[in-house]
Image (tube, rainbow, N blue to C red):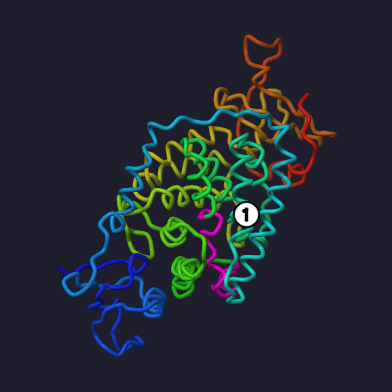
Amino acid sequence: MKKQIDTMYLKQGMYVSELDRPWLESPFLFQGFVVDSAEDLQQLQTLCAYVVIDPERGDDIDVSIQHRPAATIERIDLDSRQRKVVNVSFEEEISHARHIHAHTRSQLDDMFNDARMGRSIDVTGAKEAVSDMVDSIVRNPDAMQWLTNLRKRDEYTAIHSLNVCIFALTFGRYLGLNEEELNELGIGALLHDIGKMRIPLEILNKEGKLNLEEYAVIREHARHGYEILQGTAGLPPSTLEIAYSHHERKKGTGYPQGLRDAEIPLFAKMVAIVDIYDAITSDRAYHHGMNTLDALKNMFEWREHDLDGDLVERFIRCLGIYPIGSLVELSSDEVGIVISVAQSTRLTPMVMLVRDAEKKTMLPPKIIDLSRFMRGKAEQPLEVKKVLEPDAYGIDIREYIQKEIRVS
């Protein structure tokens, strides 16, 4: 019985009976042949998204590979995992996190430049950088998360890729993934959008809504990413799955394959969630970023049709009601930026105060731990009154990222 398979699962020895396009649009002389060389295999994987194989005339697909998405989900039983304990303070970790963040950004820029120029990419340095990020996030995820606020409108793709990696690792840590799994998830998240390096800059950076033709070009970045990564040595299969499938959606409305819920790999589902979260909270050429609370409310609604509902709810619990980087107004009328959140005290985060009660700039900024000002603990209790828009009162969070962190 013939089978349609994604070309990422194609291997030498299989008999290809049909392509996803007319044979005349391909370089192959015969309509049906055994894949007997690495050159044929690479040509098919570059040219086609899927092919039809005939197991009676060649090798069959390994069932465990063909159903890898479901197998991955079954193999990682999230309910049985235990979350790692934070073992260093935010203040201790932030200097390490800054160094790792800068180094990873440098590695990412090199890979993006190579991909843009059509050169092969070397992921050795990037894998080492991801390993350092994993170590930092395992020690204390808040420090690296604080640095996701270093967003720049004109450097969106690179900063976004780095942020997606940080959020994915933070989420993976929350879910109890071990360090090997976190490293695998991290390199895939970091490279999830590398296919955009083949998209013309005038479309990628267009101010305003894309037309249908431009949107079709943008959608090709998933396929481009897969093509770039399949020729890159030293990457686990999940890296290719993430690049290829992070725009798939639960009801089959995504791209490029229109996969449905159980068909989408777990890591691709996770990256899809953090990809959306970072995108909608960022200033882009064509829209203003949402505040964190509105972003999480929207994602909670989208879980019904687009995203894995269970994972979305876990992600919201991971970030908490006041995610790091949220601009908040306190019951004292002072305004601050959330810089750290303990899992056990999600409603009382650590906050960097940047405006006083009259909304005047506070110099130097004052950092307080709201868990020390809870009702019953302090004479003058303090709590978050509301979440503000990211640029309220003329505040630019990026100005405070590099400041030394000292708790009052």
Q: Which residue is mark 1?
A: 283
Relative side of 339 to 406, left or right: left
Q: Nearer the viewer, residue 326 or 182?
A: 182
Decide if residue 93 is on the left or right side of residue 179.
right
Seen at 61% across and 24% down, the residue is 348
Q: Position of residue 345 (x, y in %)?
A: 57, 23
> Residue 317 in the image: x percent, y percent?
48, 33
Q: Is residue 243 above or below residue 315?
A: below
Q: Is residue 279 above or below residue 9?
A: above
Q: Nearer the viewer, residue 312 or 65?
A: 65
- All told, the count of numbered labels is 1
- Placement of the C terminus among the 4 image quadrants: top right
Q: Amino acid type of disc 1?
A: Asp
Which residue appears at 78% of the width and 30% of the height? 406
Residue nearer the viewer, 34 or 244 = 34
User: Percent from the top left, x then y, of residue 170?
Assistant: 55, 40
Q: Is residue 308 above or below residue 236?
A: above
What residue range appears in magenta? 188-207
- Image side of residue 137 versus residue 306, left or right: right
In this picture, residue 389 sits left or right of residue 60: right
Helix, strand or loop at label 1? It is: loop
**Tag 1: Cα neighbours inside 10 Å, few (<14), some, or many (≥20)?**
some
Q: Quadrant of the N terminus?
A: bottom left
Q: Is residue 275 magenta?
A: no
